[in-house]
Structures are given as C-alpha cells and as structure tokens.
Amino acid sequence: MANTATDMTDDTLDLSPKLARHIIQRLGEGGQPPEYGVRTINVGNESYLDILEHEYFEHQLKMGASFKLVQGYFGGGKTHFLYCVREMAWDRGFATAVVELSPSECPYDDSFKVYRNVARRISGKPNNPLVGPNYGLPDLLRNLVDDRVDALIDDPDSGVDDPDQAEEAVERWLKRTVGRTPCESNSFRSAVVEFSRAYLTDEFEAERKLEAWLLGEPIPKTETRDFGVYEQIDKSNGFTMLRCLTQMVVGLGLPGTVLLFDEVDRNLSVSAQRSQVIGDNLRQVIDLCGRHQLPNTLFMYAVPPEFLRNIVPDYPALYQRLKSPVSLSVRSPQAVLIDLEDLDLEPVDLLSEIGAKILKVFECARDVDFDRSRQVANARSLARACVHSYFEVNHRRLFVKTWVDFLFRQMTDGERDLGDEDADDLVLNGYEAIEDDDVDNEDEFFDF
C-alpha cells in the first residue's frame, strides 16, 4: 500500500496520487517545479518563507505593501521559491501572478507589456489543482462574482431567497461599494465594475469588449466610452494601470495582491538606456510600497547576483534603496534582499532532504513501498556526486531529474544500493541530458 498524505506529516498540502503524478512528471521531464504542490518537495528556504508568513502576510500586508529582491543563480531555486510564495499567497486569498521577464516577451522597461502579462497571469487559488487556476483578470472577476452570489444563497442570514435576489444584491454591491473604491484611474474602476455587471447580467457583447480592454488588447475608444472607459492602456500608463489593478483587488474584497517577477533571461547585458528605465521603474515601485498606492501588495523581483553587482551600482537612487549589510532573516525581517545562495542547509544535506521528499511523493504517485533507509542512503550518495561535480549546470536541477529517473529504475528493476562510482556515472549522464535540453530551450529556462 502506498504512503498517503497522512504519512507526510511535514507537508502542507493534501497529496492525492493524481497530484503526486503531476509533480513527478514535472520534475522528471525538465527538473522544473510543479505548477501546484511545490511545497511538498520544498527544502532549505523555510526560514525565508516563515518570515514572509509571520511578518508580512499576517501583519505588514494587512496595512501596507512591501518590495523584496530575490537573488539566486540560474538553476538556483528562484522560480521554485516564487511558486512557494504563490501557494502561500493563494492559501490566504491573495490574487497572485508569476510573470516571466524577458527582453522579447515581457521586458521590465516596457510598462505596457508588464501590465498585460500581469493581467493575463493573475489568478486566485485553483479549486482543483489538477485543472489549474483560471488565469487572467477577467476570470478572476467572474469567479469573485460567482462566489459572492453563491455565498448569499448559502447564507441563511442574508435574507436572500433565490438566485435572482442574490444577483440583484451583488449588482448593488458592485455599484455602491466596488464603484467607490479609491482608484487612480476612473476608467479602470469603471471597466472592472461594468465588466463584472455585464457578466452577472449576461450582457455578452459588453463583457467581450471590456474583457479585451482589461487584458490590454487594442479596442477603439468608441467601443468602451458608453461604459465610462475613456482611456486606453499603453506604454504611457502601464504602471498606473498596474497600480489600479492592486487598488481594485482590495476594493473587491480580497486581502491583497502578490506580484512575482522572474528574470528568466540569462544574459543581463542590456543597453544603458534600458538599464536606466529598469532602474527607475524599480525605484518607483520601492517608493510606492511605502505609500498607499500599492495597497496590501507584495512585490518580488527575482534576479541573478550579477544584477546587484553590475547594474544596480550605476543608479545611486536605486542602490541606496537596495543596499543593505544583511539579507532577510529573523534578526532583520525588514531587509529587502532574499539571498537564495544562503539557505538553511549545506548543499549535500539540502539535496538529500529534497531526495527524501521526492521519494515520498513518488511512492504516493506510483503506489509503491521502497526500503526507505536504503533509498535515503542512495539519495545522499547521488547528492554527494552532484555537489562534488564541477559542471557549470546547477546541481539542484541535475539532482532532481537524475533522482526521479533512478527511482523509476528502482521500481521496475528492483532496489539496489547506489555506490559512489555508479552515482558519478548517473550524474555524468544526467548532465549531458540537461546540457542538451538547455541548448534546445534557451529561452524557456526554469530553475528548480
């Protein structure tokens, strides 16, 4: 009989066999963190997550905003960490978006593309992790309207007797409460209110037009003017509209917004002009987090260490805001920098613990029982081989892919001990596979 979620006392998620299969498939195919369930295999960054939970989600984000710079080499766990933060935010009801920054698809110096990607990637917690979240601001609004109608119908004290009454009550709420939300753009507030009303009342043509506007798609002003939407979203107001999005999220009754930006381009050699714009934009965000223009918002920007060493010092205003003698810790919970090169465990212990967690997920996914002590020892042997290798590829991603493949062999061919020479051979073969995969997917790199 397989180990179930009740056996995994250190996990924070209920783990079904289907979800476990999804996690193993994701890890084995590309060494990438799963879209959902990442905390079941999370190791080494718990001290950072605990501080974010107790200092920020429980206190700071209920009355203000915060900016954090996440630093780590490519393959060093930045995406993995951001996914952990996203699941934490989902569990607390925050609207959350992970946005991959790249020079072609979403450069941070293009405010319009940044807004558009956030509007397309924002979501609440998925009802079914195997289906995934409904990404996009329009679906977030639809879900909020549906949830409010259902809550009124299910509440015996609401005074609502039928769906029609519930819909009327929600429409009044949209007009009188959401419609009075403090928002920098009247057009954005009107678009949110009128889109939600159109969805509620089955006005499909109005819903379609306002959905396009909210997603930053080109639509003539004449098509939206009747709804009180007179602006267009473009480069001149992209970040203003992003601020408006966070303002309206609070006005809609959610606790706040978590925006997670992941720099996925491995080449940070950008022009001086672009660097200046990126620096100015980050400086403005940091300043806005100290005001009420980004209400209840956690803003994270994940970069490689070269960013702080080579780019930030050229911009004194940004450097002064990011410079700190220490990174985030229990002794300095206010610090801006989260340094993923400074983790709770040493490399071999870290990989060994990851291996032990993946082992539990694998057993649940494949309904097998391994000799735990033998496989834990095997994981440590493989961890030592990965850490002691001199390959440029990050050993964490290499370990994860190789370990999942090894567990499949143990399941089909029978369990055996993994000696040091065999572990070295597995690492060499795994490195060659990952190197080929990185060349084929240079613009789609995900770290573990």
Image: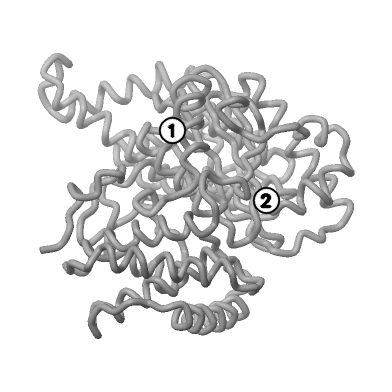
- Asked if the residue under mark 2 is in contact with the one under mark 1, i.e. CB atoms within 8 Å, the reply is no
314 vs 263, left or right, is: right
Q: Which mark is residue 224?
A: none
Q: Is residue 21 left or right of residue 405?
A: left
Residue found 75% across the figure and 32% down from its top: 325
Q: Nearer the viewer, residue 442 or 360?
A: 360
Q: Is label 2 in a helix, a strand or a loop?
A: strand
The percent position of residue 96, horizontal first and vertical second, equals 47, 41
- Foreground residue among 167 and 297: 297
Residue type at mark 1 is: Glu
Task: Indicate the position of residue 45 as horizontal and vertical percent values.
Answer: 50, 44
Residue 116 screen position, x and y as percent: 58, 49
| Quarter of image, res 58 | top left
Residue nearest the observer in this picture, 207 or 239: 239
Is residue 289 something that shows in the picture?
Answer: yes
- Could you tell whether 349 is left or right of 20 in the image? right
Q: Residue sitting at 44 percent across and 50 percent down? A: 43
Upstream in sequence: badge 1 or badge 2:
1
Viewer-side label of 1, 2: 2
Q: How many marks?
A: 2
Q: Residues within 10 Å of mark 1 (few under 14, many from 20)?
A: many
Residue 212 shows in this picture: no
Residue at 67% from the left image edge and 59% from the top image edge: 102
Q: Position of residue 118 (x, y in %)?
A: 55, 46
Question: Which residue is labeled 2 in the image?
Answer: 303
Q: Nearer the viewer, residue 22 or 217?
A: 22
Name the quadrant of the N terminus.
bottom left
* Residue ID for mark 1: 194
Give the class, few, some or many, for how many residues have Cα within 10 Å of label 2's Cα (few <14, many ≥20): many
